[in-house]
Amino acid sequence: MNDSRKIVIRIGVVIVGIIFLIKLLSIQVLSDNYRLAAENNIIQRIIEYPFRGLIYDRNGELLVINNPMYDLMVVPMEVEVKDTAEFCSMFGIDKETFVEKYNAARKYSVIKPSIFIKQISNEEFARIQDKLINFKGFYISARSVREYPHPVLSNALGYIGEISKSQLDRDTTSYYRMGDYIGISGVESSYETVLRGQRGVKKRMVNVRGVEQGLYKEGRLDTLSVPGSNLVSTIDLSLQRYAEKLLEGKVGSLVAIQPSTGEILSIVSAPSYDPNILTGREFSENFQTLSLDTAVPLFNRPIMAMYPPGSMFKTIQALIALQENVIDKDELIYSDGRLIGDLAPIGYYDVEEAITYSSNNYFFKVFRRIINQGEDPSPYIDARFGLEKWRNYVVRFGLGVTPDTDIPNPKSGYVPTVGYYDRVYGQNRWKFSNIYSLSIGQGETLVTPLQMANLSAILANKGYYYTPHIIKSIDDSGLPDPKYLIKNEVGIDSVHFNAVINGMEEVVRSGSGRRAYMPHIRVCGKTSTVENPHGEDHSGFMGFAPKDDPQIAIAVYVENAGWGGRAAASISSLVIEKYLTGEVKRKWLEDFVLKGDFLY
């Protein structure tokens, strides 16, 4: 009996042993899952960051380059620091920070590398690299940050920064990891996927103590990083530097466009800042300083500031009226200054003279004809039809809609709707007498400087435009995004533009824009003194040149600078001269602008 029991027990032990042997064989030899899990415990993945694409101006001058920076990585299991004080002194941190960072790294992983100190400069790295051998468990990972050889275009180019948790959560591509850098604003943001390149991965083997044992599978599974694509911008660096010089110490904006292509030649937001301060380890501190600045240098005025268009808007009113056949270009309309405030002389005006002298009463009557076309006997319902028709024209000029430009976050401005006035006055309870301020570019209408520069390009082209954009081509393609090659028609016959353009030339030759006059360049322009309820009026000007072969269209706003014919017209004229001739000969005008005493 006892012998039988012993035999059964022995057989059971053998069976259990065989089962364990089979299971062990399965784990060690047959199962990929366990093999891969074991390998993952001894393989370290080292990210190789690509060089971000460079950005050039239209003439091949570098606007944005990469500056080498280094992250100090740590593998907690390998760490041996005999002299903590020396380590802390070397990197400019205190012992509490050292302990905090080390514990955070251990919490992440004891054998996987993580960042210990970010963005060590080239100079710092040169100082510490020979000493780093004394501190086991720490090594350097190279990456790059942006550098700007010319401190211009800060708001348009934008900046890069460490990806936030919310951005990481929105990343549907799963490309980014915590600690990666991403374009936050400007071109850096809108062309992020083009500029960033493709990261590489190098795998190395370590033992259970975290000591490196060489490349994993002799590096056959490593992937090389792929540099980002370079961008060629539409910006003329020489013109940009000059335009920023003219707006230094002022609050305002400037946009200059090549009418035949929609390429932005210069775009200035003032006040500005040196883009180099938003790079490196001082990014957070400098960003906070800029954010708290009451002058708001981070506010991108050319695409985000909204103003009433003022008298510049009269060009659109004339074109709509001509297209609608409610006036003829040679028709004389009497203006005696009674209907609306006016500085123009009393007398008869045709389209050209009304533009030249900026007759408010003329455009009051013209706008009334646009709004009240007899579509309905009721003046209230008739006004609804007229406003809707008028607004449809205005929107085709690119106003009241968000520009599809490649500088992110542009504002749409505002063109009032029938629904807006219904909410203000009640349905069928408003008519022309409630909205007449729209006739002279005041009232509820709001525009951005970019939109007014584009209006100037439309006038230069006599009825069409290409969407303004700041990137000319990606790499060596020579072409922008295809959407910037689309010709946008505004729905006004080209013949109607002649009278308006002739009037704009006379504005510069003998009217309110005389400071923009140059005998050797035929400049066409229109000034605006933009009403400002919070202080001095804003100075505005838009124009283009030369008249018969337009090469540049421009809009300038200078806040709290008074008449449009002083600050804005002067700055526009100098930028036009600089672009078309390569030099500025009217030093008296340049001195006037640089001094900035526009109200005296």
Image: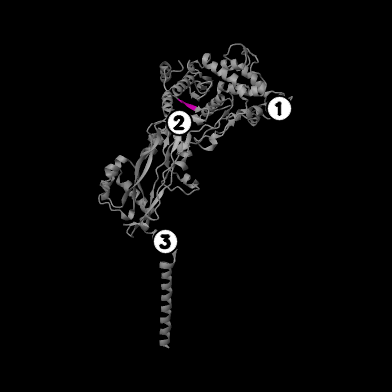
Tell me which secondary structure the magenta stretch mostly adopts: strand
Q: Quadrant of the rendered structure where residue 43 is?
A: bottom left
Name the residue: 62% across, 28% down. 491
Q: Nearer the viewer, mark 1 or mark 3?
A: 3
N-terminal label among 2 and 3: 3
| Amino acid type of the residue tagged 2 in the rendering | Ile
Percent of width and height locating residue 57: 43, 32
301 above or below 596?
A: below
> What residue range appears in magenta?
251-256
Label drawn at residue 235 = 2
The numbered dot on residue 37 is: 3
Q: Would residue 253 be counted in the magenta stretch?
A: yes
SS at mark 2 in the image: loop
Image quarter of residue 373: top right
Residue type at mark 3: give it. Ala
For the point 40% across and 34% down, the residue is: 62
Disc 2 residue crowd, few under 14, some 14–19, many 20+, Cα 10 Å: many
Q: For mark 1, what is the residue?
A: 381
Q: How is the image coloured?
A: one colour
Q: Is residue 93 above or below residue 274?
A: below
Mark 2 to mark 1 CA distance (whole Å): 48 Å
Q: Earlier in the sequence, mark 2 or mark 1?
A: 2
Q: Quadrant of the C terminus?
A: top left
Q: Residues within 10 Å of mark 1 (few under 14, many from 20)?
A: some
Q: Residue flagged by tag 1: what amino acid is it? A: Ile
Q: Residue 221 placed where, x, y %? A: 40, 55
Residue sitting nearer the eye, 560 or 387 = 387
Q: Is residue 340 visible?
A: no
- State how far apart marks 1 and 3 are (Cα): 76 Å
Horizontally, residue 61 falls left or right of residue 493, namely: left
Q: CA distance from mark 2 to mark 3?
A: 53 Å
